[in-house]
Amino acid sequence: MEKYSSRGSLLADDMGLGKMLTTLALILATSHLAKKSQIDGVQNLPVQSAATLVICPLATLSNWENELKIHFVKGALPYCIFHGRERRQIQREDLLSSLVVLTTYEMVGTSGNPLHTNQITIESLDVCWFRIVLDEAHMIRNPTANRTVNIQKLQSKFILCLTGTPFQNRLADVQSLISLLKISPWDQEWTWKKHLIPGMNVGSQDAITTMNRLMETICLRRTKDVLLNLSSKVEKVVIVSLGEPWEDLSTRFHQTFIQCFGRLRLSGEPWDSTEFFRQLTMIRQFCNHPTFARHEIHFTWNRRWQDSAKLVHLVENLNEFLQGKQGVQRPKAVIFSSFVAYLEM
C-alpha cells in the first residue's frame, strides 16, 4: 500500500476481511525500514520513532492486542498500550523501543495533570512516528472537531486509515480522510470545491472519473467476494408487532407524517427538509424503542429493554442460536443497528 503514496493510504476492506491483521502484517514487513528511519533521524528533533501508533476506539483496543498475541510470536512485534491511568507508568524508552503503540482516540489531545519527566502523553511527546494508523477512521470525518484537529498535529512519515465505510453520507466524508492523509492537492478544501464537488453534484462524467482515479491511487478495497468458501448471504425479513400501546402510537406517528409532508409534496409548497428527516428518524427509532419518542408523548414510563419488541425477539432468538451451536466452543453473533443508543440498552 505504501508504494502508491509517499504520505498515506486508505484500506477500506469489508468488515470481516482482516484489516487489523493486514495492518499488523504490513508493520512487520516494513519493520526494517522503520528501524532504518529511526537510525537516520537519531540526531534530529523531533525524536524519530520506529513505532507505528495505532489509534482506535476503546471498544477495539483489546482486539488489537489479541491479534498481536495470537498471530505473532513473542517479540516479533514489541508493543505497548498507552491508555488509562497505566499510561503514566510508561517511559519514553518504552515507546521508542516498541514497534506498535496502541492508544485510543480519547488519549489524543488529553494532557491530564502536569507531567513528570518520565510521564508523557501522546500529544506532548515530541515524536515523529514512522506510521500512524487510524482504526475506524470514519469516526473522525468532521474536519473541525477537536479530535480531528489534534490528530492532524501528530507527526509521522506515513498515515494509514482503516474503515469499511469511507463514504458515510456525503462526499465530504472521504474528503476529510484524504485531508488527514495529506495528499496534495486533494488535502485542500478549495481543490474539492473547485474541481470535484460541483461536477459530482450534477453527475459529471469527468468529475466521476477524477474521483475514481483518486480512490484507485490511494485506496485498497476488497469485498467478501474474494472469499471463495464464504457461504452465500441469507436475508430474512421478520415482522415484529410492537404491542400495546406502542402499535397505536406508531400508526398515529405515520399518519401525521404522511398527512403533513404528503400534502406539501402534492401542493408544491416549500417544506423544511431538516424537520422531514427529524420526524422520519424519530419514527424509525420509535420502532426500536418507545423511549426515542419521549418528547412526542405526553406521559413517561420506566425505560426497560422489555418495552422493545425487537429486543425481546432478538434475545429470544439469540439464545436459541447460541444453544443450538453444539460443538462450537465460543459461538459468535454480530448485531448491527443504525442507532448507537439502541445497542446501549
Image (cartoon, helix red, strand yellow):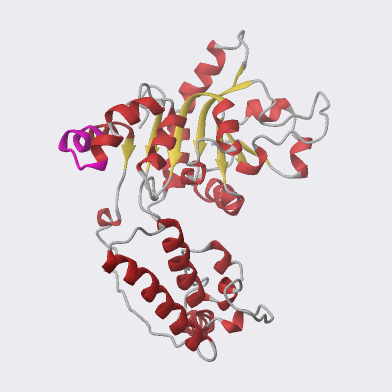
Give yes or no for residue 160 being in the magenta stretch: no
Front residue (pair 127, 204) = 204
Q: Position of residue 121 (x, y in %)?
A: 71, 31
Q: Position of residue 263 (x, y in %)?
A: 33, 71
Does residue 202 appear left or right of residue 133 in this picture? left
Is residue 215 visible in this depiction of the protein? Answer: no
The residue sitting at 64% across, 36% down in the picture is 108
Front residue (pair 70, 176) = 176
Q: Position of residue 207 (x, y in %)?
A: 22, 34
Q: Quadrant of the C terminus?
A: bottom right
Question: Extreme bottom residue here?
Answer: 244
Instruction: Tell me how many marks there are.
Output: 0
Q: Position of residue 95 (x, y in %)?
A: 66, 29
The residue sitting at 38% across, 26% down in the picture is 190
Front residue (pair 323, 32) = 323
Residues rendered magenta in the picture: 201-211
Does residue 203 appear left or right of residue 106 in this picture? left
Does residue 251 appear left or right of residue 13 in this picture? right
The residue sitting at 49% across, 28% down in the picture is 31
Q: Quadrant of the N terminus?
A: top left
Question: Extreme left residue here?
Answer: 205
Whether residue 254 is situated above or below residue 46 in the rendered picture: below
Question: Extreme top residue here?
Answer: 43
Whether residue 26 is situated above or below residue 300 in the rendered picture: above
Task: State which quadrant residue 46 falls in.
Answer: top right
The chief SS type of the magenta part is helix
Does residue 132 appear left or right of residue 7 in this picture? right
Is residue 32 visible in this depiction of the protein? Answer: yes
Give yes or no for residue 205 being in the magenta stretch: yes
Front residue (pair 274, 42) = 274
